[in-house]
Image: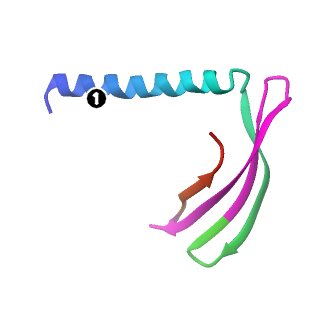
Amino acid sequence: MGASEREHGVNRAAGRTLQRKSLRALWRPDWHRSAWTRRDIVQADDTKVHVVTTFVRLREDGGQIASYDSLYVLTYQDDRWAIKGRSSFAP
């Protein structure tokens, strides 16, 4: 990969980061942080766990903007647990 290709890769990555920040500001300009309100293991064995979650998006003053349900699939591989997949209705 030449210098020009590396620069374009960096520019594209920076552009995507800026785009995500801009979209977040458009969607919910008052979104300050998120917090879990529910995390329940609904199925599990020695190498896989399904976790049903709910999280809220909060304003800086702690006021709730929205609440979303999600499902996480965690797997144990290579001597560690990691998120294998997530499904959520959150934008």
Q: What x and y, as percent, mark residue 62?
A: 85, 29
Q: Residue at x 73, y 37 (%)?
A: 34
Q: Which residues, given as a range, are shown in magenta?
A: 51-80
Residue 14 is covered by the magenta coloring: no
Taking the image as shown, residue 87 lies to the left or right of residue 1, namely right
Measured as percent of width and height from the top left, residue 66 is found at 78, 37
Type of amino acid at the residue the image marks with label 1: Gly
Q: Is mark 1 on a helix, strand or loop?
A: helix
Q: Name the residue under label 1.
A: 9
Q: Is 80 left, or right, of 69 in this rendering?
A: left
Compared with 79, 7 (above or below) is above
Front-most of residues 91 and 78: 91
90 displayed left or right of 20: right
Q: Is residue 59 above or below residue 70?
A: above
| Residue located 76% across and 51% down the image | 54
Camera-nearest residue between 67 and 14: 67
**Residue 49 in the image, given as x and y percentages of width and height:** 63, 69
State whether the magenta stretch is mostly helix, strand or loop.
strand
Residue closest to the eye, 90 or 85: 90
